[in-house]
Amino acid sequence: MNDIIAKVQAAGVVGAGGAGFPTHVKLAAQADVFVVNGAECEPMLKTDQQLAACYPEQVLQGLRYAMQATGAKEGIIALKAKYQAAVKALQPLLPRQVRLEFLRDIYPAGDEVMAIWLTTGRRVPPGGIPIQIGVVVNNVQTLLNVAKAMNGEAVVTRTLTVTGAVKSPMTATVPIGTSMAEVIALAGGVTCEKPAYIDGGPMMGKLVADLSSPITKTTGGLIVLPADHLLIRRKQQSVQSVLRIAKTVCEQCCYCTELCPRHIIGHELAPHLIVRSVNHNAIGNPQLLQSALTCCECGVCEAYSCPVGISPMRVNSALKGEFRSRNIRYQGSLGQIDPMAEHRLIPSARLVSRLNLRSWYPPAAPLQQKIYQPERVSIPLRQHSGAPAVAVVKEGDKVEVGQLIAEMPDKALGARIHASIAGTIKQVSPQAITIRKGGAAS
């Protein structure tokens, strides 16, 4: 067990599907059930399903190591039933203590809390974490990295979806630190006149301001859309504008609450009541306002529920920032599951239509087996939860692929960083380490 955790830590493995929580910390916990989240929460992202189909033995190997480390007696691989290639690859190889759980094609099936409920029936308490109910969750790519770590391989590449208004939508594997501009070029370049870019999925992804930004361990996808697309305009909207619209047009229809995934499974979170309270100078139950801290920012309320274009999610996000700055934590308990819960989960196809993404929703492009080789990478020192890594190299040093270039800070949550290409250290800054291929440092 300790050997597994030590090797995973040494390899710099972090959660590949979210905030990049260091995997060695998760594996140090003791659990009953280990869930492999292969549902891929966001429409348009098609990476984990292809990795599971192409590398089923390695996925199961990573799961076995994870179960051994955590003491989990049961392993569950959660896949949408439509991922037939992945199902066919994994099913014949399943060991006795591992089963497949087939999920409907709904959003947000891949949200960690929802995935646990859909696969085990257990509910994570508001403001809590899965280990509180005896569950640990990792996605497919994370477990592939666990399997590689046990063979002494560090995390130096990222597999991601490149889609939208590009000539050749693809699933590509690139060295960490590769620029987003290069990744877009790999997909044949953009096909619209005024493009805008999203790092991640269409619902929870962030706008990209600079295409020189690097691919990190947690970059799930890169989506290109026209700059006037409703998703881009929504993501550009200021918080002040969101609050002004909420005050002006909220009709308290309650749809945002009725379709909120957290509310459905018994969390106190009620977006329509939070909007009402904020609209009236934050009067009302303080705990209700603090329940905004349990919002997963899935975007259902703004992109699907609200008939008048309000974003309760952005209101929640603003409140979360305020409460965290004051070190306020939510203290609440689970309520009853909505009796209509199963009928309030949103079909992905309907969501894609509502978001006007049908034109950019092709079948999963084949996974490119060849790893792209850039001439230069800029590797961020913070690409995980916790403190940024500390550089252990200096300008002019020669490095090989997989060589340690930044260490975890002493006695702090963090992850190691390794060279993703062989070459010379060109620059070491407080934010990133730049490596240029070959021997010249200039």
Image (spheres, rainbow, N blue to C red):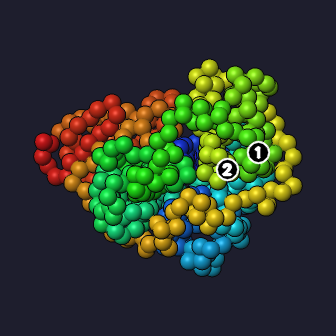
> Which residue is drawn at the image coordinates 71% and 46% (left, top)?
256
**Label 2 sits on what residue type?**
Pro
Q: In which quarter of the image is residue 120?
A: bottom right
Classify mark 2: helix, strand or loop: loop
Name the quadrant of the C terminus.
top left
Q: Percent x, y for residue 303?
A: 60, 51
Closer to us: 86 or 337: 337
- Tell me if label 2 and label 1 are in contact, CB under 8 Å: yes
Above or below residue 171? Residue 248 is: above
Closer to us: 294 or 141: 294
> Which residue is drawn at the image coordinates 69% and 28% (left, top)?
278
Per the model, the C-alpha gap separating discs 2 and 1 is 9 Å
Q: How crowded is mark 1: few (under 14 residues within 10 Å), some or many (20 or more)?
A: few
Query: Which label is found at residue 253?
Result: 1
Q: Name the residue under label 2.
A: 307
Q: How crowded is mark 2: few (under 14 residues within 10 Å), some or many (20 or more)?
A: some
Q: Outermost residue toward the front?
A: 248
Viewed as shown, does residue 96 lie left or right of 436? right
Q: Percent x, y for residue 179?
A: 31, 50
Classify mark 1: helix, strand or loop: loop
Q: Percent x, y for residue 215?
A: 37, 50
The earlier-in-sequence mark between 2 and 1 is 1
Query: Which label is found at residue 104?
Result: none
Q: In which quarter of the image is residue 104?
A: bottom right
Closer to us: 119 or 298: 298
**Label 1 sits on what residue type?**
Cys
Viewed as shown, does residue 371 lie left or right of 99? left
Closer to us: 209 or 31: 209
> Which residue is drawn at the image coordinates 77% and 31% (left, top)?
288
